[in-house]
Amino acid sequence: MDIKKEPLAYRMRPRTLEEFFGQEEIVGEGKLLNRMIKADRISSIILYGPPGTGKTSLARIIANSTKANFEKLNAVTAGVADIKRIVADTQNPILNPKGKTVLFIDEIHRFNKSQQDALLPYVEDGTVILVGATTENPFFEVNKALISRSSVFMLKPLGSHAIKRIIKNAIQDKERGLGNLDIEMEEDALNYLADICDGDAG
């Protein structure tokens, strides 16, 4: 597929921490999540915040950086059978010689109690390392036992400085962005775009 035919926001999703703008409180140099990703020592985590704050992007960065097997589910469409399939594949040394699986579950709050209960023993015994993303407060929507075995990181709406860096990067990037079009944007226009984004980089 021609990458240029994909939406700009999709093309410009960060692939590494160096390409990720904003959320310095949790992924800035020396912060816990930054260290976990760089050392490839991810433990179960839950990323909580409004849309467009970087939850899925951080999961993608983890996928790009980890040597572990990486699987993705969306809680809206997935069920217990999907969890069991991933666990079975993880426990199969032929299918998963790496020996561990990082499981990203988008919208984890959409899993009902029985689905979350089905996931719990595999998080407890380390069969899977959970990376959950949710727009809802996980302390109300996610199994307390899952919460107790995970580090919860709260992502905040992006500030205008981070939004402007994202826009500038998209304009200047010649590989995935609009850099070959030689677009110049005045500061007033840049400020306007950053303001109307209202903290949402999506």
Image (tube, grey):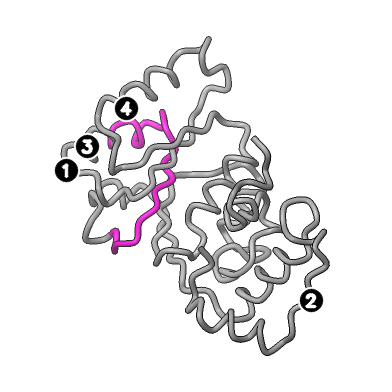
Q: Secondary structure at mark 4?
A: helix
Circles 3 and 1 in contact, beta carbons < 8 Å: yes
Residue under label 4: 82
Q: Which portion, as a residue range, is magenta?
A: 120-138
Question: Of the residues under marks 1 and 4, which one precedes in the sequence?
Answer: 4
- Give the residue at the far top of this rendering: 94
x and y, in percent, of residue 78 in the image: 30, 35
Circles 2 and 1 in contact, beta carbons < 8 Å: no
Residue at mark 3 to residue at mark 4: CA–CA distance: 10 Å
Q: Secondary structure at mark 2?
A: loop
Give the vertical position of 81 relative to 186 (above or below): above
Question: Which label is found at residue 188?
Answer: none
Does residue 152 appear to the left or right of 145 in the view shown? right
Residue at mark 2 to residue at mark 4: CA–CA distance: 47 Å
Residue under label 3: 115
Q: Residue at x 34, y 61 (%)?
A: 135
x and y, in percent, of residue 170 in the image: 70, 63
Residue under label 1: 113
Residue at mark 3 to residue at mark 1: CA–CA distance: 5 Å
**Quadrant of the frame with the N terminus:** top right
Does residue 181 appear to the left or right of 53 in the view shown? right
Q: Residue type at mark 3: give it.
A: Gln
